[in-house]
Image: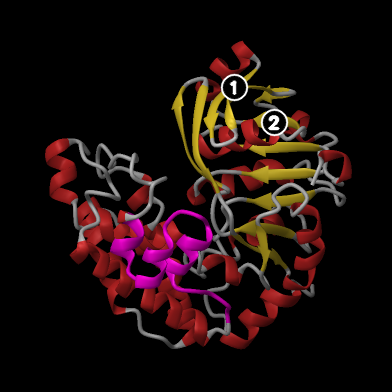
Amino acid sequence: MAVTESPVKRIAIFGAGGGGTSAAAHLATQGFEIRLYSQDPEALAPLQEIGGINYTAPFGDGFAPLHLITDDAEAAMDGAELVMIVSPAHLHEKWVGAAARHLTDDQVLFISPGHTLLLIPHVLREHGIRHPVFCETATLPYLCRRIEPTKCKISRVSDFMVFGGFPGKETERLYDVVKTVYPSVQLFSNVLETVFPYGNAIHHPPAVLCNVGRIEATGGDFRHYYDGITPSVGRLIDQVDKERVAVAEALGAKTMPFVELFWRMGYTTDAARDSGIAYEAFHQSEPDKWIMAPTSLDHRYLLEDVPYGHLIYQELGRVAGVPTPTIDHIIHLASVIMQRDFRAEGLTLARMGFGDITKESFLNLLENGFDD
């Protein structure tokens, strides 16, 4: 849809990493007025010097001028119809807290990727918003990296993004707005259904744990997906995926196997989809082939995707009464290797303010929101 036909003209983007700069570049080329916000002066300074971001992408190579590049959240949000938070999950509290102080009723708060379940409503309520409303996608709109201080690389724009809102009864209204910016969003019921398709949480921890020696010995001098995911590693990912799907089904959440999702996003081949096997999905993924392994274990593949991914699946399994033995062991092994207690520091329902919630109350809250 052309910008002239969209209710969104101005977009505040929170986050200047790979996802945020890629969103800024892409959406600026689509004609939207972009305000890029970050609290990191080192991330902003190179972009401020040139007034935008250089990009290489499927839609071309070039330079995208940005309307505003700032560390002032209020200035970034002033007049924006859409406030888009593009950050790792462990930064959601920080960014949502910064946005909450200036959020108006007529602005749409959009998290991409989201998948932190009830954390964002919890943070918004802590900032005085009694009846929070927001929306999210399960995954980033892009396969991307910030490859230089002033340049991002987008190797793929997603063809398929699971979209949900909170509360669920607001999802369709929010969808009608966001689809004018990202036509590839797909309408799902609520933010429970955006938790389960978060692909990184399915495959990053198993792949890294199976390659810890190689990462430490080589400093990540191998292709993470193409070299690191062998048939045996793929089988471990497939088992994690089976447990994830079982939990989703027990909670009545619509989801799909990882390989199907990966194919719908446009990241792998028809033959890989037909196999239903994670190993084939990655080995036939052209966009992923160039991505190198982490240079150390101190990386979001474990530090985000275990405490904000696997742990949520474990928590939801507990609510649903579904065992998750493979997921449980991955959380334990990652904690041992990293010398951290990911269960203690991760995203539990208790941390979101709902430690003792029943399945029925949980599902009602997701659909209807807060009644106080």
Residue 219 is tagged as none
Q: Is residue 15 left or right of residue 247?
A: right
Q: Residues within 10 Å of mark 2 (few under 14, many from 20)?
A: some
The total number of labels drawn is 2
Q: Are marks 1 and 2 in contact (CB under 8 Å)?
A: yes
Residue drawn at 42 percent across, 59 percent down: 269
Q: Which residue is mark 1?
A: 62
Residue drawn at 71 percent across, 66 percent down: 166
Residue drawn at 83 percent across, 43 percent down: 8
Residue 29 is tagged as 2
Is residue 260 visible to us here? Answer: yes
Say which amino acid is labelled 1: Gly
> Is 215 above or below relative to 305?
above
Is residue 346 visible to us here? Answer: no
Q: Residues within 10 Å of mark 1 (few under 14, many from 20)?
A: some
Give, as a single range, the part of the protein colored magenta: 253-282
